[in-house]
Image: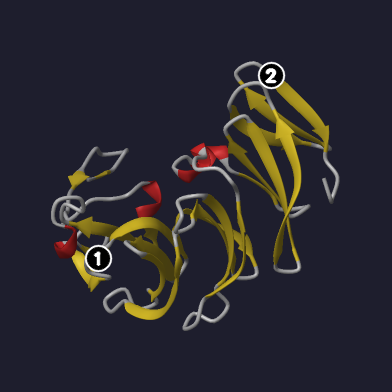
Amino acid sequence: MKININTFEVKSGSVPGRLINQFAMDEYNNNLRVATTIGNYWKFRDRTTNNLYILDDELNIKGKLTNLEKGERIYAVRFMGDTAYVITYRKTDPLLVIDLKDPENPKHLGKLKIPGYSTYLHPIGNNKFIGIGKDDDRKLKISLFDMSDYNSPKELDKYKLPEYWSEALYNHHAFLWDEDNGIVILPVGAHAYMFKIEDDKITMKKDDKHKSNVLRSLYINNYIYTFSNEEVHILMKIAGI
């Protein structure tokens, strides 16, 4: 539904399927782009399909790309200008690159298949993304993706943790990217793991351990703050941690 906040005029449209999260919906140049999964993945996984729809200003479908990676479901989506990045998963992690320059005729450009999957994609500049997800053994991993060649996306590096859960998997507010210093901070249980992204490599620099589960982190001026229910830790922020 689309509501004009001045006149309260309501417009509505519909597409089949369900959204994985807020990143599966994006407005750009008066078009609404939506990525959905159709079907019950757990009961009829062989029949599920994934689709991308583009709706116009009146919320009518003007373009679509359907039947993507049949038998899988969407785990992550990121729209960036005229391009969409969609991750589906069943046994491997296809990262799909979709061209949206012509809203009436979206096109599938390239695909990267790797073990495991990502549930959150974060752009970091120079056509690179950080992916937060799990490897094929279900353990947490951080991936560094290069999207500079839309027809042939690459995983430049990955770092796997001996852990199985982070709130950042499904809540992007738990993820912190310090662009100035190339630092990623990830809460995992009672740990705030700090990684350096440099020269297309991911290096773990510090494990800031709390007494209870770490919830959030942030930086203010020259200090990094990490928060749990029982503690606040303050660390000097420097380029290499």
How busy is the neighbourhood of tag 2: few (under 14 within 10 Å), some, or many (20 plus)? few
Please state if 230 lies on the left or on the right of 120 as rendered.
right
- Residue located 60% across and 37% down the image: 187
How busy is the neighbourhood of tag 1: few (under 14 within 10 Å), some, or many (20 plus)? many
Q: Report which residue position mark 1 lands on.
A: 51
Going by the picture, which residue comes out furthest to the top? 230
Q: Quadrant of the C terminus?
A: top right
Residue 143 versus residue 119 in the image, above or below: below
- Residue located 73% across and 34% down the image: 208
Give the distance between the C-alpha atoms of the residues marked 2 and 1, in whole angstroms. Answer: 44 Å
Residue 120 visible in the shown view: yes
Q: Quadrant of the N terminus?
A: top left
User: Which of the two residues, 25 or 176, is positioned nearer the viewer here?
Assistant: 176
Find residue 22 and report its horizontal and vertical position in percent: 38, 47
Residue 63: mark in rendering: none
Q: Are marks 2 and 1 in contact (CB under 8 Å)?
A: no
Residue 30 visible in the shown view: no
Which amino acid type is shown beneath numbered disc 1? Asn
Instruction: Write down the quadrant of residue 47 in the picture.
Output: bottom left
Q: Report which residue position mark 2 lands on.
A: 231
- Residue located 16% across and 54% down the image: 14
For the residue labelled by badge 2, is the local secondary structure a helix, a strand or a loop? loop
> In this rendering, which labeled residue sits more in front, label 2 or label 1?
2
Instruction: Write down the quadrant of residue 222 in the picture.
Output: top right
Which amino acid type is shown beneath numbered disc 2? Glu
User: Which of the two residues, 215 or 10, is positioned nearer the viewer here?
Assistant: 215
